[in-house]
Amino acid sequence: MRVDGGCHCGKITYEADIDPDKAGLCHCTDCQTLTSSAFSLFVPVPKENFRLRGEPRVYVKTAESGNRRAQAFCPECGTRIYASAEKDPLVFNLRLGTVRQRAALSPRVQLWCRSALPWVNGLSSVPQHAKQPK
Ligand SMILES: [Zn+2]
Ligand SMILES: [Zn+2]
């Protein structure tokens, strides 16, 4: 599936060919902090299927395991674009919130459920508004 997207300010844009069946989400505590949210959403894209325009900044995160992952984000607006191996990545884990077609990419797997926030699966019972209430 061909997708495109970019950061909030438009400085970084991309096109990618992805397999929608590989979309997922991650409840690990690093993702919670890095997204400042409950979990991160991702879909992997092989290097040859990824065309990036603009120059992201990279923050290297060291996991509990010692594994180092590059976290690329827009230097202007801070939007996270992808995570990848630190050196010569063959695969980029695109951050789904930046993909224009994200509504069609429902997660097929959940990782690190051990650290999932306890309320995350009960949101359908929380009062809902179509927009910001007055
Ligand atoms: Zn930006
Ligand atoms: Zn994670």
Image (tube, rainbow, N blue to C red):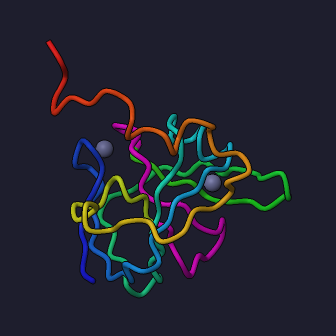
Report whether 60 appears left or right of 36: right
Give the magenta part as a residue range: 75-93
x then y, percent, for residue 75: 41, 42
Give the residue displayed 41% in from the left and 56% down from the top: 81
x then y, percent, for residue 85: 64, 69
Residue 78 covered by magenta stretch:
yes
| Quadrant assignment for ligand 2 | bottom right
Front one among 75 and 120: 120
Front one among 25 and 53: 25
Report whether 110 appears left or right of 20: right
**Residue sitting farthest toward the bottom:** 48
Residue 95 covered by magenta stretch:
no
Looking at the image, residue 31 lies above or below residue 55: above
Figure quadrant of the C terminus: top left
**Residue sitting farthest toward the right:** 65
Give the residue displayed 19% in from the left and 23% down from the top: 132
Front one among 97 and 60: 97
x then y, percent, for residue 100: 22, 60
x then y, percent, for residue 122: 48, 40
Looking at the image, residue 54 lies above or below residue 49: above
Figure quadrant of the N terminus: bottom left
Report whether 77 appears left or right of 90: left
